[in-house]
Image: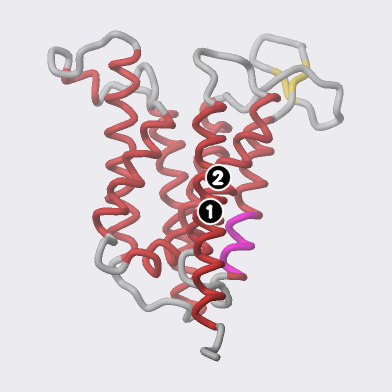
Amino acid sequence: MEFTLLGAALLGIAAALATLRIERVRGTTDRKDLIDIVLGATGSGLAVGRVAAMVLQGTNPITHPLDLFFIRGGVDTGFAALGSLAYLAWTARHDFWPTLDLLAPAGIAGLAGWQAGCLLRSACAGTTTSVPWAITLPGSTIERHPVEIYAAILLLGGAVALVALRTKAPPGVIASASLVIAGGVRLMTEPLRLGLGADPGPWYMTGVAVGLISFSIRVIAARSRNIPDS
C-alpha cells in the first residue's frame, strides 16, 4: 500500500476536523453531526476517486478488487471531489445551505492539509525556478517551486477567511465561495506544476464557474428578501 498517500489523506482529514473543533470552541456551531458528515464525504470521495483512477488506467475494479485498497495509482481528484459533493448533497438535503456553509471552512482546510501532505510523499516540487525558497527532487540539483506548499498556504488563508465571514454571510454564500477558492487556488498554481497525464484545468474552471454562479444567485436572493414591499 502507498502509505505516504494515506498519510496525506489523514492529514487532510485532521485539518478538517481541527477546523470543526475550533468552531465548536468558538461557539459558532453546536452541530454534533458535522464530523460524521466530513468523514463520510471524505470516504466517499476517496472511494469514487480511487475507482475512477483505476478505470482511467485500464484496471477493472471488479476483477481486481484488492487494488482498491493497494493504492498504487493514486486517486483521481476530480472524481473524488464529485463523490464528496454528491455525498454532501444527499446528506444535507433537508438543511442544504446551512449545513454546507458550516462545512465549507473545514472542507477548504482539509484540502490545505491534503496539499501539505506532499511533504510526506516528497511530491511538493513543481516547475524550475531560482527563488530563494526553491526545493529539489531527491537525487537532483535542479531547483523547483514548492507548488503544493503554495496551494496549501492559499487554501489555509481561504479557510480562515471563510470562518471569519461565515456568521455575516447570507445562506449559501460561504459554501459557494468555497468552490471558488478550491478551484481558483488549483487553477492559479497549475502552471507551476509538472505536467503529468491529462490536464485537470477544466475541472478547476468548472468549479470556479459553478461557485461564482451559485455565489451570485445566493447574494441576489438574499438582497431580494431584504427589499421591503412598496
Main SS category, magenta section: helix
Q: Residue furthest left?
A: 63
Task: Find numbered disc 2 in the image and state the secondary structure of the residue it sits on.
Answer: helix
Where residue 13 appears, as percent x and y from the top left, is: 41, 49
Q: Quadrant of the rendered structure where residue 149 is?
A: top right
- Mark 2–mark 1 contact, CB under 8 Å? yes
* Residue type of the residue flagged with mark 2: Ala
Please say if 226 is above or below 24.
below
Instruction: Name the residue tied to disc 2.
Output: 182
The vertical placement of 223 against 19, above or below, is: below
- Describe residue 132's horizontal placement relative to residue 108 as left or right: right
Count how many numbered circles sit on residues in the image.
2
Residue at point 63% right, 41% down? 185
Residue 177 horizontal/vertical position (percent): 56, 56
Residue at horizontal 25%, vertical 67%? 94
Estimate the x, y position of residue 53 in percent, counting from the top left: 34, 20
Q: Nearer the viewer, residue 27 or 191?
A: 191
From the image, tell me which residue sits under label 1: 178
